[in-house]
Amino acid sequence: MKSETVQISGHLMDSGILSRVLDDIREYGGDYVIERFDVGHDAGDPSYAQIVVSAEDDEALQRLLMRLQTRGVNQVDPGEAEVSVAEHDGVFPDGFYSSTNLETEVRLDGRWIQVQNPEMDCGLIVDDAGVHTLPMADVRAGMKVVCGASGIRVEVPKSTREEGGFGFMDSDVSSEKPQGVLVRQVADGMRAAKEAGQKVLWVGGPGVVHTGAAPAMVELVKAGYVDVLFAGNALATHDIESALYGTSLGIDLAMGQGVEHGHEHHIRAINTIRKAGSISAAVDQGVLTGGIMHALVTTGKRFVLVGSVRDDGPLPDVYTDVIDGQRAMRAELTDVGFCLMVATMLHSVATGNILPASIPLVCVDINPATVTKLADRGSSQARGIVTDVGLFLEQLAGELVPDYRRR
Amino acid sequence: MKSETVQISGHLMDSGILSRVLDDIREYGGDYVIERFDVGHDAGDPSYAQIVVSAEDDEALQRLLMRLQTRGVNQVDPGEAEVSVAEHDGVFPDGFYSSTNLETEVRLDGRWIQVQNPEMDCGLIVDDAGVHTLPMADVRAGMKVVCGASGIRVEVPKSTREEGGFGFMDSDVSSEKPQGVLVRQVADGMRAAKEAGQKVLWVGGPGVVHTGAAPAMVELVKAGYVDVLFAGNALATHDIESALYGTSLGIDLAMGQGVEHGHEHHIRAINTIRKAGSISAAVDQGVLTGGIMHALVTTGKRFVLVGSVRDDGPLPDVYTDVIDGQRAMRAELTDVGFCLMVATMLHSVATGNILPASIPLVCVDINPATVTKLADRGSSQARGIVTDVGLFLEQLAGELVPDYRRR
Amino acid sequence: MKSETVQISGHLMDSGILSRVLDDIREYGGDYVIERFDVGHDAGDPSYAQIVVSAEDDEALQRLLMRLQTRGVNQVDPGEAEVSVAEHDGVFPDGFYSSTNLETEVRLDGRWIQVQNPEMDCGLIVDDAGVHTLPMADVRAGMKVVCGASGIRVEVPKSTREEGGFGFMDSDVSSEKPQGVLVRQVADGMRAAKEAGQKVLWVGGPGVVHTGAAPAMVELVKAGYVDVLFAGNALATHDIESALYGTSLGIDLAMGQGVEHGHEHHIRAINTIRKAGSISAAVDQGVLTGGIMHALVTTGKRFVLVGSVRDDGPLPDVYTDVIDGQRAMRAELTDVGFCLMVATMLHSVATGNILPASIPLVCVDINPATVTKLADRGSSQARGIVTDVGLFLEQLAGELVPDYRRR
Amino acid sequence: MKSETVQISGHLMDSGILSRVLDDIREYGGDYVIERFDVGHDAGDPSYAQIVVSAEDDEALQRLLMRLQTRGVNQVDPGEAEVSVAEHDGVFPDGFYSSTNLETEVRLDGRWIQVQNPEMDCGLIVDDAGVHTLPMADVRAGMKVVCGASGIRVEVPKSTREEGGFGFMDSDVSSEKPQGVLVRQVADGMRAAKEAGQKVLWVGGPGVVHTGAAPAMVELVKAGYVDVLFAGNALATHDIESALYGTSLGIDLAMGQGVEHGHEHHIRAINTIRKAGSISAAVDQGVLTGGIMHALVTTGKRFVLVGSVRDDGPLPDVYTDVIDGQRAMRAELTDVGFCLMVATMLHSVATGNILPASIPLVCVDINPATVTKLADRGSSQARGIVTDVGLFLEQLAGELVPDYRRR
């Protein structure tokens, strides 16, 4: 048996974090002894725990220690980080440290160096500029990669209770919640990000258009509350189809009469934009004159559209290579201070994968499974709202856009 | 093989009704020959079909003919109704005619007599006052009951296309629909009922309170758009708990902070009302001063609360005998001109069971299964809206209550 | 501010129980100081915590203390129980102790007395025979009722980790789990109950019949693994309809051809049993010759059918008064050692309300919401399996009934 | 107004197809006169309808006519197909004919030419070899593309009622169905395809592994009932992770103990295969020794893995460009005679998009939305089974693999 002493501090009691740490140890086949436990006496005090964890061999112990770091558990005596050289393009050395989305520091030559761009499931690359995360696909032979759990420490974001940051309802996913309060809290979060000079990132699915919420989102774009949009071919196409033909996958939005599968309109809308060359070119040529994509182009906002295997067309702006698409998404994360995910499972999970845990994240969907899946995949900061997307965005515009309701 | 000639007229082509008729025949093990089919040439014209249906014996044929009547199919030569006498309390004679919720006439002694109170799955009782529906539990030995399918004709409500009545979105259940249009259509339906001097019936579940929609519903009660409420112990208790303690099953509505299972508050709220004697007495005594039930009492509106096996308490106003409860619900159906069902499967299905097909019916729930189940059980006029109940009621109040949004 | 010192012991760290206790204190508006915390050093050791809780007045403190008892938290110095006399039938005294479903003791005249029939949300009645739970509807003027939280202590069931009892998968509700293992665990739980001379309680919905699982359940009845069945009118009617006409709400089970809404068969099946007088009489008269209800009657097993407001008929055996129905269900709980809930939300929650927390409870449904709701309502021992009910029961029969698969 | 006479024949009455045709006309803003309607007198006879459809201008009429062809409605006098030349790579000419997934013929120079590879939402390309479908992304400047609806006729697959082909339950999606019958019908469909010398195509999601169904699927691969697998990075990675570490996203399959998010195992499994070079290389090197992917490699079966934006890694075999992935999937469709989709929305819709309507298609998922979405997108032949994937595959193996249950 190999063992190591680890420590964790913070609101261990009320956050349930210690239970999860001990669960992890058991699940990884390890064992533990709690050496020291200083409990915060008053409700506001932090606690501190020191635990000896053990596993049957060093490899298992290292994997367990890496696992515990996703909970904010660090080694008492972390030592120095171990670095190996990648031998093949796109392949990490065996035993590579798999990163968390938490604030992370690496000790090299006795100095603690802050890791840039914390992201889940990446490697930590050491070069002259310091230490940064890199996804597996981008590693190149010869790069220096951190291996094992030594010489690394992470910091869990302080909970909102402690610091009065983005306050938000309890994390349980529920469709039975007072929605008006939730709408106001999201509006407050967006305003706070803008006031801090940060960007608001939206991740959206086609439901935004189907539910008739596009006009509300257009107003939110114009009011400056959408700095970047991550989406797929579907949201953009349905929005453009709606602008060109007044339909969205067969829903006649003006009349409220259902039109099932408007194949022709869908595929023709894509063809029209392909002919123009790009969404932006279609706006310039006067072909596209309304909708969400039009609003993003005319206000100079950013969007990243990443394709999927079920796409028709796709639109010329869509990244058909998903790894290229991930890179384009990463490039837009700088200065993001708030993230809202609306009506999309695929792109929400994709964004959750690359987003640092320090960025407030709210996920809105009528389907509880989307919200649950996001939290299950490690985006522990995710807060879920199970509600109707159309009514939610209309109410959000009512909160954020002056005079929205009189229009 | 026994056979009979039946007929049906109307918009057979565009309503898909003929397909369903032929499906029924097959499903009941029968056969058919279409003798005559006059198709409406233009889009607005009705069609007419005359069909010979056959089954292996008279009993099977009679059951098939009764089944077809739920689709509006009548016998060309209906003959006279056959009447048998019930031998036992609570038991119909064998071969009793199981009623539909459609407008129905019965031929007795050569005269067509209109059936009062059309309701599904009842018997048709003949007495000096005419013919009326009666549920199985209420039949008494000696009553005269219509048997077999002879001498009966039904009339399917005209579709909205034909008569410009309560226009509404296509019946498909979908969460991907422009909700603003739907809210306005429900508001129009309620206004039309009130203008025609009819009552608006609400059927509600506890989600109305959990989603924070109670204030909106209170305003709708005060504005006169809630004449009758059918609900269970849960809606009333959570509403009263919220008025007494500011919580609803543990949701602190004002702060938006979740409080799981407030058992004490729940059971104490019930005890408090039991002590007062009734909800109305609690209002009179100044014990209950707010919420939906308070608004109903102070505006003199009606409510019927029917219990279920999972109830705590229950409140003193709750019918603990479900058959008594059904009777109380039936007694409130007179002059109802519009029905809105919100966030309840149990009471929605119960109301659908007793409601004539001629009354417009809209069902709002975040769970598509509730809406589907309602239509599956025979409430073919049901229109479903899959959305967030809280935001929906807030928008509905915005449409119907002057100055609602400025409050 | 009023305060009281409470204590809790057990596996506080790995069960997350302490977090929930502190959450409760905050949610009830109280405050706390942790006076003492002895942590179990090794993975198998229990921990002990002593906490001073405070609230703004004695009433709030008493309510908070009662709340904490649902978590197994007792007062260090519980004192004597306070007893008041009920003044009205069906109404508890103000400040009554609202019971948990945990093992509970009450101190009267210095002696600890075990509470009989632990059940949630009841009062504790003191009489010459001792102390027992009583639902609100059954209390009578003059009875002595325990009030406040003093003089009461509860005991949380030991987790399976500690005692090697009914081992079962983690409580998270998930449709993504290896089902074969789960089936075997349920089979083991049933066998263990039978070997201990205890009864197996089933709670079932109509989905048991719709999914074609009735033959499997019949075999399980015959093999002795169904001692009591709690259900509603629907399960029994669909089962009987299936036996009489070979259909279940329009599903032709033999051919796998869907038949929507077989109204006639449904209502006629009920009428047939009403004519016979009861299900058992229909079996005796040779009217009912197969199905689940037939198997229960012929093997002398018990069933309690409790009605709901959406019922047709109902069958003569159905309790139409839900409070009478609850009483009948309670009367069958003696010696129950395992409970399986299948495909019903309403009756599962109703059973969860009256079942002691010490009885292992597994809930099987294709809808995750049913399982979640059960746990949310306080049945903390509930283990959920989200799966297809038909295939599950077929596999369960394969495990428990010798030669089942060769039939 | 422009008008055109169209015709349709078949079981118009019982399939509801005529209702949908008339709905389409209205939804596209057109009008109609039914000129002739010959109804099949007996239950087995086909009907025939001739309809004059009109729209406000020729462009609208052409779009409407193309729409009607998706229902099997052809022009009485189709004339000659019109062909235009594509001017840009990846862009169809305006007014291009958007293809259906039905059997299609095009009239050129007076001859009817069969379209190869019917697929939805493609263009029809005319070259020396005849006429074939081509997705938008693959069109090149200079290619000849069919435009407008003239000169085209389609044929709807005969329903199973008419020809006794792959018989299957009614298409309604329902979780309340006798599953044993359904399992047998799928087994029969697979056997029939194999006996006809055709391939069985599987489309799978990671739920296949999570539900513990991998061993059953491995046996089905070995028994020859899986010729091609379409999947994403997730199914293959979880299968490989399970083979390498005995876990799948944290589920310990052998013990049935849940392990949430096994990040390290997940990302390490991918790294291991990337190091080997490919899945097949990992099998050859003895690195990968079990699981579904191993079974496919060792039995020489085909698989196409197409990535998505949420992927980690991905595995070296995964197409990261989704359009390349679609091409690879299309290339495997030759001789496919049966398609089973299991536990995946994304890849099921993607496969539905490219699959001819003539291939029987069954979709199995615990989530009804997956099945509904598939049918909504135009895969009208799709039959849905809402059930537990793990138990379903185990039962399917029990039907198809000799002695499976004794293992």
Image (cartoon, coloured by chain):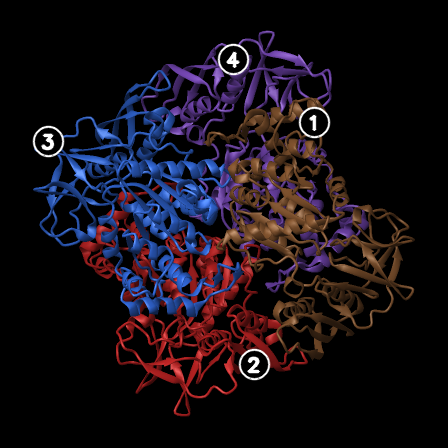
Chain colours: A blue, B brown, C purple, D red
Question: For mark 1, does the 10 Å Cα neighbourhood hold few (<14), some (14 to 19), or many (20 or more) residues?
Answer: some
Disc number placed over residue C137 in the picture, else none: 1
What separation in Å lies between label 3 and label 4 (alpha carbons)? 54 Å
Q: Position of residue A225 (x, y in %)?
A: 34, 44
| Kind of residue at disc 2 | Val
Query: What SS does tag 4 mark?
Result: loop
Query: What SS does tag 3 mark?
Result: strand
What separation in Å lies between label 2 and label 3 (alpha carbons)? 83 Å
Q: Position of residue B62 (x, y in %)?
A: 78, 66
N-term mark: 4 or 1: 4
Chain of the residue under label 3:
A
Q: Would you say D327 lies left or right of B378 here?
A: left
Q: Is residue C149 above or below residue C257?
A: above
Chain of the residue under label 4:
C
Instruction: Report if the CB atoms under discs 1 and 2 are less than 8 Å apart.
Output: no
| Kind of residue at disc 4 | Asp
Chain of the residue under label 1:
C
Question: For mark 4, does the 10 Å Cα neighbourhood hold few (<14), some (14 to 19), or many (20 or more) residues?
Answer: few
Which residue is more in the foreground, A200 or A372?
A: A200
Q: Which residue is mark 3?
A: A111
Q: Is residue A241 above or below residue A15?
A: below
Disc 2 with disc 3 on a shared chain = no
Disc number placed over residue D52 in the picture, else none: 2
Q: Which residue is mark 4?
A: C57
Dividing the picture into quarters, in which one does residue A334 lie? top left
Q: Please name which of the two marks, 1 or 2, marks the residue nearer to the observer.
A: 2
| Kind of residue at disc 3 | Arg
Q: Would you say D147 lies left or right of C221 here?
A: left
Q: Is residue C340 visible?
A: yes
